[in-house]
């Protein structure tokens, strides 16, 4: 009972102090030490104003980007401890991220051997492009149907940037603009399911797409094809947009078959 009585007396004193001089009491109270919480397995401060909002989705995206940039070679082992240090995340979160990427086809998990970067063969890359064909035709068709006047202005500007990069032989800039064009068409389509599937397929075949981008003479062939797709969408002609998309992807299949 002694401890209880002491606690009651202390509480009473604090209440009287608050009543008599609340500002001084609140200003002089001890500040709590920085607290840490485990958010989805990743250690973040809960008291810092610039708290880093790192989530499981963010971690998966960062590892995915590293794979697509070529930071990890095909068949390279992905060691959880190393990834944990590199991305400042718990091993449990890294393990979950690798499972997510395995579901996307970027990583393969081996029994009793952990995970490694999945290598995509040329044959599989061709199959991926063939599947993309139907989805990208659908998106191009929908984009032509949904195009607003404001979107048309932005798309026309993008077309000129693509033309300028191609004419100047800017391979890096051209490749980046092509990716922007693909994203713009998907966004304009408004088809969430097709967009999700395409992004997954594009991630799987990213290495082969990179090889094709630097294939001799490729820029001279692909630039008119991309511009034809944009022109058809700007004309709000769904059939022409779908056909231009099909011709472009058939050309990619032909190039892949020759690798």
Image: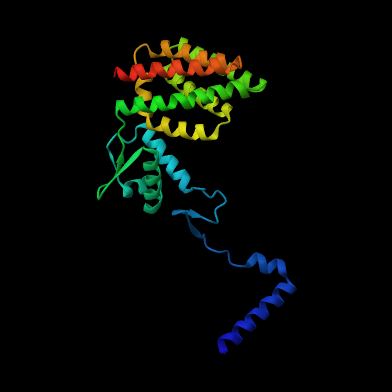
Q: Residue furthest right?
A: 20
Residue 16 is left or right of residue 206, and the answer is right
The answer to whether one can see residue 7 in this image is: yes
Q: How many marks?
A: 0
Name the residue: 39% across, 25% down: 129
Answer with left or right where residue 41 lies relative to residue 191: left
Which residue is outermost to the left? 112
How far from the left and from the top, in percent, is residue 29?
Answer: 62, 67
Q: How is the image coloured?
A: rainbow
Q: Quadrant of the C terminus?
A: top left
Query: The N terminus is located in which quarter?
Result: bottom right
Q: Nearer the viewer, residue 166 or 121?
A: 121
Q: Position of residue 226 (x, y in %)?
A: 49, 16
Residue at image point 40% right, 44% down: 100
Tell which of 3 and 108 is nearer to you: 108
Is residue 230 among the parts visible in the rendering? no
The answer to whether residue 196 is above or below residue 96 is above
Q: Position of residue 250 (x, y in %)?
A: 40, 17
Q: Is residue 198 above or below residue 44?
A: above
User: For the point 31% across and 19% down, which residue is it?
Assistant: 257
Q: Is residue 3 above or below residue 231?
A: below
Residue 7 x, y percent position in the rendering: 60, 82
**Left or right position of 251 against 259:** right
């Amino acid at each position: 009972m002694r401890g209880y009585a002491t606690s009651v007396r202390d509480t009473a004193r604090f209440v009287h102090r608050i009543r008599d001089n609340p500002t001084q009491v609140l200003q002089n109270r001890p500040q709590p030490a920085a607290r840490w919480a485990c958010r989805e397995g990743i250690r973040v401060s809960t008291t810092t104003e610039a708290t880093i909002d790192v989530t499981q989705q963010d971690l998966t995206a960062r590892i995915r980007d590293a794979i697509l940039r070529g930071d990890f070679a095909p068949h390279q082992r992905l060691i959880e401890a190393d990834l944990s240090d590199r991305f400042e995340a718990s091993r449990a979160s890294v393990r979950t991220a690798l499972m997510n990427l395995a579901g996307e086809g970027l990583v393969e998990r081996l029994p009793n051997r952990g995970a490694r970067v999945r290598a995509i063969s040329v044959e599989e890359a061709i199959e991926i492009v063939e599947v993309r064909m139907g989805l990208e035709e659908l998106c191009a068709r929908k984009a032509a149907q949904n195009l607003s006047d404001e979107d048309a202005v932005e798309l026309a500007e993008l077309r000129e940037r693509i033309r300028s990069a191609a004419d100047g032989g800017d391979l890096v800039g051209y490749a980046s603009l092509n990716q922007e064009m693909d994203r713009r068409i998907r966004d304009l389509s408004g088809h969430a399911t097709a967009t999700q599937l395409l992004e997954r397929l594009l991630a799987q075949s990213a290495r082969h797409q990179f090889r094709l981008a630097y294939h001799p003479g490729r820029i001279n062939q692909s630039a008119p094809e991309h511009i034809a797709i944009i022109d058809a969408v700007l004309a709000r002609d769904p059939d022409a947009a779908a056909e231009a998309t099909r011709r472009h992807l058939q050309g990619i299949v032909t190039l892949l078959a020759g690798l």
